[in-house]
């Protein structure tokens, strides 16, 4: 029964979030700040993780596909498609759910327990919209950009790790990257990142906004936010994959 | 003027406010006193509709806040200022930005006008040279004063203060009390203050409402509170040995 209450409360909150902003200019300023805080500041970690991810995928493919019957360009191709289809959208989103999600939940939760949200409400500001809408737009906007960056860094990672294995050369690897490219895969993954971006911002915001108590509850809300967002990302990954590949 | 009539509020079958009615007058400092957990904060938050009551009327100059739509409520709230217990300043904004925020949201003032008004509000609460400091960089008393400056930024008709003296030393408490009193008279606003600070009661208690276990226990002013025969109020007001001693001396003086 509780889960239905939570889902209902989540949609009621989203209804408030997507109401008309009081003053567009202030929201615009907030949006730029959130893009900087949630997006630009995630570029470093996304790049580092993606380089390692691409390198590891390449090494795994190299050692598991070292068969004279299989063309070596498949290693580059495999790395590219794995990155595009799952790693740079789903795994990256899971990582962002941890970094960005916990940030959002704890920030809004702290504002709730220190009465800053009450203060906004009492001024006549729609606190849900003012605090959450710029975060959702920022994360949804930045997610596809991070996805593209991640694919690029992953391919670079493979380019570094592949030749180290001694099984695939740079030229063979690059051949694979350029072979049988399906543009739909990119579109499919961008759709997924948009949905995941929405979840990464809105679910933690919901948990943060509904915190009651003190610092301990903010911590719990932050944990719950990350766990729920991660589960929802995987759930929607399953649904979207089924829907879009049908 | 704010009038509340027969309001009731419960949390999970536990009644916190039990049929409370009173009038908070304009241009006066109206104090709500009572022990911790007596329902003062719930009453204050119910009056501004941060909490919804189950029964009763809450009239702001005749306008019932409970019957207002969200858009009308938002307009009314622009006539309110509130000083929360911990100040509730926005951590991500500096002092000047905190005071400027309501103006940014709800006025069409130019940047120059806003800056001038920020200076005026901060001057009014005796804060100078702290415009660029963040809430984490200022003292508790200063945070309260910045909160007052923000609360008066839009020239409110109603000012609400939740424990404005909590966590402050006696000297700073008196400064805050006097500041609230001066602002109330100067801007002719209806001020409601939640407190259990007896010094505030004596200094600025134009009207006093005593809440005990969610019920209205007593009503009067700062002179009457000293001579009341209300047992619960006496236990609250004269809880400290110092206040008991003062009362004894006062009674002895009157008898002589």
Image (cartoon, helix red, strand yellow):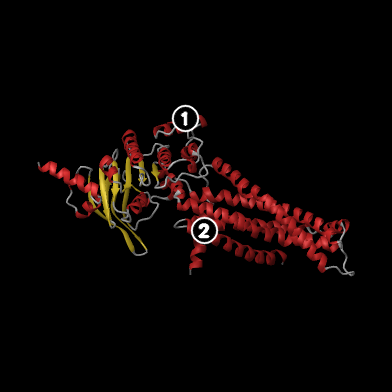
Instruction: Give SS at disc 1.
Output: helix
Residue A245 on image: x %, y %? 72, 65
- Whether residue B226 is visible: no
Residue B35 on image: x %, y %? 30, 53
Residues indicated by labels 2 and 1 sit on the same polypeptide chain: no
What subunit carries mark 1? Answer: B
- Report the Cα–Cα distance between label 2 and label 1: 41 Å
Residue B119: quarter of image = top left
What subunit carries mark 2? Answer: A
Instruction: Give SS at disc 2.
Output: helix
- Give the side of residue A161 with respect to residue A110, left or right: right
The residue located at (17%, 44%) in the rendering is: B249
Placement of the C terminus of chain A among the 4 image quadrants: bottom right
Residue B195 on image: x %, y %? 32, 47
The residue located at (34%, 65%) in the rendering is: B13
Pointer 1: residues within 10 angstroms few (<14), some, or many (20+)?
Answer: few
- Whether residue A118 is visible: yes
Residue that numbered label 1 is attached to: B116
- Give the side of residue B144 with respect to residue B2, left or right: right
Marks 2/1 in contact by CB < 8 Å: the verdict is: no
2 or 1: mark nearer the eye: 2
Residue B124 on image: x %, y %? 39, 33
Query: For the image shown, how many numbered marks are present on the structure?
Result: 2
Residue that numbered label 2 is attached to: A219
* Residue A149, above or below B186: below
In this rendered view, identify the residue nearer to me: B132 or B238: B238
In this rendered view, identify the residue nearer to me: A25 or B194: B194
């Amino acid at each position: 029964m509780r889960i239905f209450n939570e889902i209902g409360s989540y949609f009621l909150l989203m209804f408030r979030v997507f109401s008309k902003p009081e003053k567009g200019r202030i929201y615009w300023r907030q949006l730029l700040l959130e893009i900087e805080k949630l997006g630009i500041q995630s570029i470093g970690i996304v790049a580092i993780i993606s380089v390692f991810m691409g390198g590891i995928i390449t090494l795994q493919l190299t050692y598991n596909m070292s068969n004279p019957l299989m063309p070596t360009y498949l290693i580059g191709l495999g790395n590219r498609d794995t990155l595009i289809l799952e790693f740079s959208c789903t795994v990256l989103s899971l990582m962002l759910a941890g970094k960005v999600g916990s940030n959002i939940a704890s920030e809004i939760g702290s504002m709730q327990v220190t009465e800053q949200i009450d203060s906004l409400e009492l001024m006549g500001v729609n606190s849900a919209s003012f605090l959450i809408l710029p975060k959702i737009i920022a994360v949804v906007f930045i997610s596809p950009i991070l996805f593209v960056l991640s694919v690029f860094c992953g391919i670079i990672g493979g380019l570094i790790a592949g030749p180290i294995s001694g099984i695939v050369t740079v030229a063979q690897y690059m051949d694979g990257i350029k072979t049988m490219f399906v543009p739909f895969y990119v579109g499919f993954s961008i759709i997924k990142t948009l949905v995941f971006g929405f979840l990464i911002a809105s679910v933690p915001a919901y948990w943060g906004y509904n915190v009651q108590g003190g610092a301990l509850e903010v911590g719990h809300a932050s944990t719950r936010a990350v766990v729920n967002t991660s589960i929802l990302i995987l759930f929607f990954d399953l649904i979207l994959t089924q829907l879009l590949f049908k | 003027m704010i009038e509340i009539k027969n309001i009731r509020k419960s949390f999970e079958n536990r009644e916190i406010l039990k049929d409370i009615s009173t009038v908070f007058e304009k241009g006066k400092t109206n104090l709500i006193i009572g022990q911790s957990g007596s329902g003062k904060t719930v009453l204050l938050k119910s009056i501004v509709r941060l909490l919804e009551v189950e029964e009763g009327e809450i009239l702001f100059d005749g306008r019932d806040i409970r019957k207002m739509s969200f858009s009308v409520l938002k307009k009314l709230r622009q006539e309110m200022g509130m000083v929360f217990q911990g100040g509730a300043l926005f951590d991500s904004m500096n002092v000047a930005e905190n005071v400027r925020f309501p103006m940014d949201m709800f006025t069409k003032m130019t940047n120059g006008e806003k800056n001038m008004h920020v200076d005026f509000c901060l001057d009014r609460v005796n804060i100078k040279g702290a415009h660029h400091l963040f809430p984490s960089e200022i003292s508790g008393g200063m945070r309260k004063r910045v909160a007052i400056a923000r609360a008066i930024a839009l020239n409110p008709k109603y000012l609400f203060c939740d424990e404005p003296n909590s966590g402050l030393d006696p000297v700073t408490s008196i400064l805050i009390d006097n500041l609230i009193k001066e602002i109330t008279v100067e801007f002719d606003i209806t001020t409601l203050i939640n407190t259990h600070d007896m010094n505030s009661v004596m200094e600025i208690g134009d009207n006093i409402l005593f809440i005990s276990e969610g019920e209205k226990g007593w009503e009067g002013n700062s002179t009457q509170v000293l001579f009341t025969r209300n047992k619960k109020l006496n236990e609250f007001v004269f809880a400290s040995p110092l206040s008991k001693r003062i009362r004894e001396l006062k009674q002895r003086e009157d008898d002589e």
